[in-house]
Amino acid sequence: MERTAGRLGTTAVDGVPAGRVERPTSTTEVSALLRETAAAKETLVPCGARTKLTWGLPPDSADVLLDLSALRGVVEHQAGDLIVTARAGTPLREVQECVAATGQRLLVDETLPGATVGGTLATHASGPHRLVGGTMRDLLIGVTLVRADGVVAKAGGKVVKNVAGYDVGKLLVGSYGTLAVVTECTFRLHPVPAARRWLTARVGSAEEAQELTRAVVHAQVVPAAVEIALDPAGDGALSVLLEGRPDGVAGRAGVVRELWGGPAESGDAPEGWGAYPWDPSVTGEDRAVALKLAFRLSGLRDVLTEARGLRIRGSAGAGVLYAALGVEAGRGSHEEVAATVERLRGVCAHHHGSLVVLDAPGSLKPALDMWGPVPALGLMQRVKDEFDPDHRLSPGRFVGGI
Amino acid sequence: MIPVEPREAAIGRLTARARELLRPEGVITDRARLRTYECDGLAHYRVTPALVVIPDDATQLAQIVRACAELGVPYVARGSGTGLSGGALPHADGVLIVTSRLRAIKEVRVEDQRAVVEPGVVNLDVTRAATPYGYYYAPDPSSQQVCSIGGNVAENSGGAHCLKYGFTTHHVTGVEMVTPDGEVVRLGGDAPDTPGYDLLGAVVGSEGTLGVVTEVTLRLTRLPEKVVTVLAGFHSTDHAGAAVSAIIAAGVVPAAIEMMDALSIEAAEAAVQCHYPVGAGAVLVVELDGPSSDVDAEYADITRLCEENGAFEVRTATDAVERALIWKGRKSAFAAVGRISPDYIVQDGVIPRTALPEVLRRIAALAESSGESGVRVANVFHAGDGNLHPLVLFDDAVAGAGEAAEAVSRAILDLCIEHGGSITGEHGVGHDKAPSMARMFGEDDLDTMQLVRCAFDPDRISNPGKVFPTPRLCGERPGRRQGVHPLQEAGLAEVF
């Protein structure tokens, strides 16, 4: 295991300096580390490629930055069974390259370049393919985890169909490293389709976006993704991805053109496909306020109307959008940003959804309600207390101070 | 904490409370009537509950659970009672909460692709309500004409079409539930990705051990443009298995791939005269659905792949009547074995699909080695995802046959575990397979799962005795110091 003493300021989690960095190379080493650090009640923040390490709230403390990037590589790929097992620190891209050799893919999008299996799991990041493939929660079939007390446990298994015991894997997806340290994951794979085709229509209003989305979502063309990209003025494009057999895709492209009643560009992926509406290379105080909005499908128009003035991208067909409030837009005072967030949260809530501030400049975070209202928070706190009674794992990053 | 009180006294107080809360017909105490609830679909386990309650609505249900929590009385929730693992087996000192009157389909909102239903709603009724709008509810367990959505949520039910569409957990977006301390909470909702832990993901498939759902929000799926069902006859299960592998390798994901072997075909013919290909050692039922031209292309592929792998007859059904004819044999298989065997055990296990030929050979060898007892195994399974449903046939009148059949059934599960599979693909662990959990999972794995149980139900009153072979004492921390509390040691506090 590599061990690096943290120097103040050089290794930090969202502005919180890490005492030291530990870089274990196996599940056994992770377990040993968690046992060793238990006595002194040291806090640990697990990370992978650090592409989303500033997401959520800053941790209360980070005695150890638990760098899992050395737990890397595909452990097993059974093409005939359509499953793959990878270590948590494996970049998603590496998993895709491995399984692509047999014409397969993991239906999890790489939303940030270099993102790992574990980091994507911890933040529940998802992209365009969520419409049909679901998200990591739907594709994860087995998991190896190390508990705060160092106990190594498995849940699920290597077969897709399995109802033996609790689905602990789903609890870990989106838990921001607060419950346990995931070291290995097994996923269900899908075949790479023979043909793919994108159709893109310009949209100039929220009404139009809603109409075009509705037309394609309720048709029988089985879109693999329905994505929207709008600039702050509300202009942009709606794109549909069709996947399947060459004849089938060609036929369905014709149906979509007819439904949309006008010309639609067709061809390769539109620019920025699956990317967030903010520039991930901008860090520190200049970074955008990054929002995730979820709502009932029928709420799309209202949400888009309310979000005018922000850059928007996301899965219009699934009821999940991302919005960026950048410095260039002159986002105003902390109070004004907080007011914008609450106004958007209001419209999401009206359509039975939620708004989460994924990331924001450090100076802004204290002014924002990052997670918003969380139902069943008491139960969540009890789950946290059972898994990590001393609150050593990523303390304070998650909902309700967890 | 559970009050220390004799069980009988607690039940007496609960009964009195139930009579205040429910209609008189909703409280059953008569011994003879209680006995009609003594088992679920796995009828050889029977326990008469101390009390049966049938609430009219979610409020009453929550009040009953709260009363159970206050009095420390264990409860078991039951939907239609079709489960095959004894998951709804009553507790002798507890109350059975029957959800059959919570049967309202509250909303069907196709604009949002959602339906909101009460837990007693029958699975197929959701599809019936959505079909006029061009939608349906995808999970389709074989018992879908009678089984309840609440039971489906508890068991994370599958069905023939989950190969392509996934299980209940992929189609439930939210629940309202009563936790074991009587609190009503909402998990998930209409919209995706509710902030916080995915407690919904843990609750679906927890077999009623984390609480009772009182309302379920379901995802509705657009009806496919075209559905084609193919029946292919093969000389052996090896040939049929090779065809399945070829279909998967070709990148086709059919809605369903089902296989039956010679013995199960014989049973189905005897029961429903399904007229499957004469002389078949195995049949495959392959269903394709989706946009027309994609289905046509996939159909061409799978018929070719079946023929290349030895199919001697391939039939195609394109309308509902023809499809029903093909499915009739497959769907009747479990009940049909009653025609060829006086007694049988339905097993449910999963193997990696690629292990299919070897596992089938070893199952055949197991039956042969059971010797004089006359045990036979008929194989029916969801071949696409390796979910086996071996039917172990025996005659209880033959001395030792029952024991031999149980031994074969257990050995089949061992084969599943040995090949890296699962002890249950869709029937659940329940009462039946709780002891087998320790064969599939290590102590630490089970301990970790039970941390979730401790968070929801520290007093273990919600469907106790199911899923886990041994309960975890909540608050107990294995490997931790169990000594005197530091504050007490320092004289700063006393323990009373």
Image: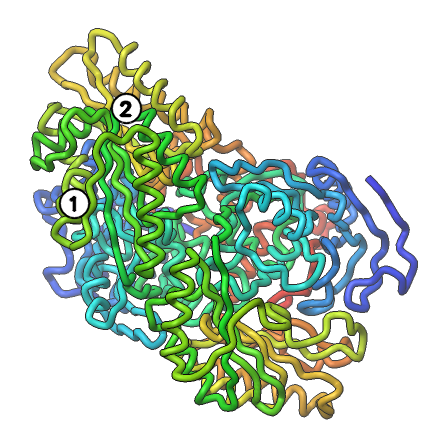
Say whether disc 2 or disc 1 marks the residue closer to the N-terminus.
1
Q: Nearer the viewer, residue B351 or A264?
A: A264
Which residue bears the numbered disc 2?
B236
- Residue A4 at x, y = what percent? 88, 48
Residue B461 seen in the figure:
no
Q: Residue at x 55, y 85 (%)?
A: A344
Q: In the displayed orientation, state which residue is furthest to the right.
A: A7
- Residue B302 at x, y = what percent? 33, 42
Chain bearing tag 2 is: B
Type of residue at label 2?
Ser
Which residue bears the numbered disc 1?
B37
- Residue A240 at x, y = what percent? 48, 71
Circle 2 or circle 1, nearest the eye: 2
Q: Nearer the viewer, residue A148 or A53?
A: A53
Relative side of B451 to B485, left or right: left
Q: In the displayed orientation, state which residue is furthest to the top.
A: B372
> Do residues under tags 2 and 1 come within 8 Å of each other at their CB atoms?
no
Q: Nearer the viewer, residue B117 or A105?
A: A105
Asked if B205 appears above or below B424 in the picture, the reply is: below
**Category of crowding for the residue at label 2, using alpha-carbon neighbours closer than 10 angstroms: few (below 14), some (14–19), many (at least 20):** some
